[in-house]
Amino acid sequence: MAGEFDLIDRYFGLRSAQRVNPLVPVGIGDDCAAVTLPPGAVLLTSVDTFSEGVHFFSDAPAFAIGHKSLAVNLSDLAACGAEPVACLLALSLPSVEDPWLADFSSGFTRLADLFSCPLIGGDTTSARRGGGITLSVTVLGQVPGVSSMLMRKNAQVGDDIWVSGDLGAAALSVAFQSDPTALPALDAATADLAKQRLEYPEPRIALGISLRHLARACIDVSDGLRSDLGHILKLSGNLGAQLQESAIPYASVLSSLPPALRQRFALYGGDDYELCFTAPVENEPQLRQIGHSLGVPLSKIGRITSGGGISLETLDGEQINLEGKAYEHFN
């Protein structure tokens, strides 16, 4: 059976970080890695922990777990307008399963290569007493200066509210895999498409970089649009939002569901990892052009208001307040 260091060499230590990103002169192999930044650049960091049974289903493909564990962290960099530099991985395993590790490593490194974000270190441990798989990923990114960093706190009254891509498919998959009998019947193609969206989120790195001087506030939609937009509103001075349901980009897999379920998954469901941002009204033409050039749909879904709370004008013209919270650990 492979020991810790054999495991690292076999699955995570065979590649040169400098070939992937020249900002990393020293990668895996020493007690510390080394990262250099251009003059004036600012280093950004983010970390997320993934636990079996909480963040991914036990039967999820190892390749998909590898992809998503890095993708959700890259999504944080995208929300700040940052360019990826490198990442670190801490992996706790109940046992060493070579096929699982090979697939996990392939999913992880494929995405790392795609975004020039080499793995430069981390840790591997055994999970004792029946524990499941737990992994923690830290990403490093850079922006040219603090003034170019996108943050949650800068929304202003009158800003348009935008969201990239579409919403709700990942939450539908979570609900369907958790209890298929609690939902209207889904055909196999719809269930598979929703599962793909759950397991393979696409970090909007290029979009985030393009928004640096066009958006005022930005966040990635990890816990649901209502919850994450609420963070922007709170940190920007307890502002409010008026949304138009007709503009919400519902994922196509929700089309057969009753309206209440569509709202639930698109507005309260998590795991979309799209960007929600606010921008001055006059920036709309540039934003439309960016979405077109990147091939990323951008939807203007509402406007920032002075009053607190989030209201939604439904397809029937009714005004409703969006109450409730998204999933929270320990709550």
Image: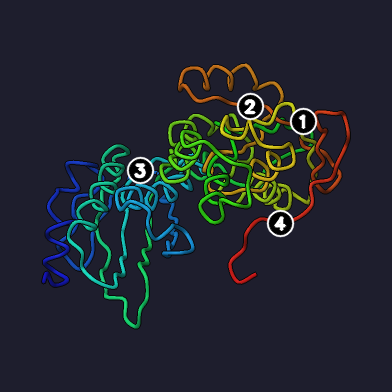
Q: Look at the picture and state if 173 lies above or below 159.
A: below
In the image shown, does 276 or 287 lie closer to the viewer?
276
User: Image quadrant of residue 205?
Assistant: top left
Dot 4 amino acid type: Lys
Residue at the spot of label 4:
325
Q: Position of residue 325 (x, y in %)?
A: 71, 56
Q: Position of residue 54 (x, y in %)?
A: 49, 63
Label 3 and label 4: CA atoms lie apart by 42 Å
Give me the residue at 29% from left, 37% from top.
Answer: 114
Label 1 and label 4: CA atoms lie apart by 19 Å
Dot 2 amino acid type: Ser
User: Image quadrant of residue 328?
Assistant: bottom right
Label 2 and label 1: CA atoms lie apart by 11 Å
Front label number (3 vs 1): 1
Dot 3 amino acid type: Pro
Give me the residue at 58% from left, 26% from top.
Answer: 298
User: Looking at the image, is mark 2 or mark 1 earlier in the sequence?
Assistant: 1
Q: Position of residue 233 (x, y in %)?
A: 73, 47
Specify whether 99 is left or right of 75: left
Dot 1 amino acid type: Gln
Q: Residues within 10 Å of mark 1 (few under 14, many from 20)?
A: some
Q: Residues within 10 Å of mark 2 (few under 14, many from 20)?
A: some
Q: Position of residue 154 (x, y in %)?
A: 67, 43
Disc 3 + disc 4, Cβ < 8 Å = no
Q: Which mark is residue 244?
A: 1
Residue at the spot of label 3:
39
SS type, badge 4: loop
User: Looking at the image, is mark 3 or mark 4 earlier in the sequence?
Assistant: 3
Residue at the spot of label 2:
299
